[in-house]
Amino acid sequence: MAAHRIVLTNQQIASYVLLTLGLVSLLASLFFNLETLALIGLGLTFWGAFFVYVTPTKYVKLDFLIASATASLSNIERILTSEKTDSKGVYLPPKYLKDYQSSLVFIPPVSDSSLPKFERALLDSGTLYSKDPTGILLTPPGSDLCKLFEKELKKFFTDTDFHEVQEDLPRLLEKLRIAKSTTIQQTANIVTVEVKHHIFEDLCKEAIKLRRTHESIGCLLPSTIACVLAKATGKPVIIEKEEQSPDNEGTKITFRIGED
Amino acid sequence: MKAPRSHSELERINMQLPLNFLNIILWLGITAMILLVTALLVLSYEGPQSIMVEERKIENAGILVGILFLITIAIRIFGLIA
């Protein structure tokens, strides 16, 4: 039988120490009949139990997250390799999708500098191949993270605009401790996002090994931001470039916003 | 403060929490206030956090302790009237 090792965080250790001290103090107050000791014990026991209650338990090590995310990226790489495509993926705005809250990336068969023309017909998120225009439709790696951001912000990106995203996204990434700082700038149809010290750096290094996926769809964080931008602007979005920032402290991602 | 040593001394110990009802009311009131103010501050704060907590649980605990405080107050008032 495998032995289960319980790993406690410093916060949990502190909570259990408070709880133990409180209980000892309460018992001692019963024994010595001291009111002060009883009040101290009551306080310590309560705050100890309270911190045990409010400490989040659903946490996984980042390594596990990277290990599980790499497999789905590898599958995308296999699809792109079998289709022999090197084209940039186009993150579709909600108006082309059957499910407005979902995200899809369209990969044309040949590389073209211009964005493909889409009919106003709704694309079914269940199909892998699109006929008009011809190409592959994939669920981007950042699709669910984008939904999680919406849940945290308590609003849909489809109900916001670029300026709101410019304010909300850096604050959210900081609050969720995904990145230390984020700046979003727009020049004409080019959006530059600079993310410093983000937690997906290792995952992005793994994604670089998957050349086609990295070139076409991008790794987790750029993909998530592309989903957010496509939803907020209501226009197709392409990840133009993903590079290390000049000070080597983060990632600089360049997005191109398409026209309708 | 001296710990009882002999068996007869132990038998005489009154194992009762040395807190009266007013102590409990005061403690519940202060704790409820701390928790509710903390919940309000934490829920409106959007910067980076050094301690990981579930904000909604602080609010729930605050409301629960607050209700307990109000119940104890009601008992006290009822006791004074009756």
Image (tube, rainbow, N blue to C red):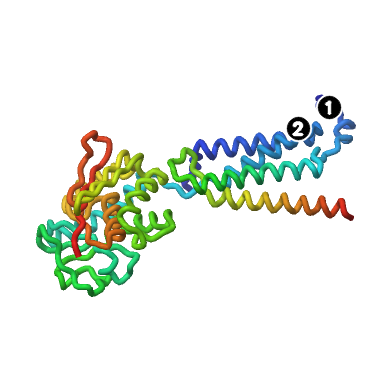
Q: Residue at x 86, y 28 (%)?
A: B6
Q: Which residue is mark 2?
A: A36
Q: Which residue is mark 1?
A: B5
Badge nearest the viewer, 1 or 2: 2
**Please, is residue A40 above or below residue A165 in the view?**
above
Task: Give the residue type that dot 1 points to.
Answer: Arg
Q: Residue at x 79, y 39 (%)?
A: B19
Q: CA distance from mark 1 to mark 2?
A: 22 Å
Q: Residue at x 18, y 55 (%)?
A: A216
Task: Give the residue type that dot 2 points to.
Answer: Thr
Q: Dot 1 lies on which element?
A: loop
Residue A153 rendering spot, x and y as whole percentages: 42, 54
Q: Is residue A232 left or right of residue A25?
A: left
Chain of the residue that carries numbered disc 2 in the rendered image? A
**Please, is residue A51 above or below residue A79 in the view?**
above
Judge if badges 1 and 2 mark residues of a common chain: no
Residue A173 rendering spot, x and y as whole percentages: 37, 46
Instruction: Mark 2: give few (<14), some (14-19) or many (20+) Cα within 10 Å.
Output: some
Residue B23 rendering spot, x and y as whole percentages: 77, 41
Q: Dot 2 lies on which element?
A: helix
Q: Is residue A173 left or right of residue A256?
A: right
Chain of the residue that carries numbered disc 1 in the rendered image? B
Q: Quick one: A185 or B43, which is closer to the camera?
A: A185
- Are the residues flagged by discs 1 and 2 in contact, CB closer than 8 Å? no
Q: Quick one: A27 or B10, which is closer to the camera?
A: A27
Q: Is residue B29 left or right of residue A197?
A: right
Residue A101 rendering spot, x and y as whole percentages: 35, 65
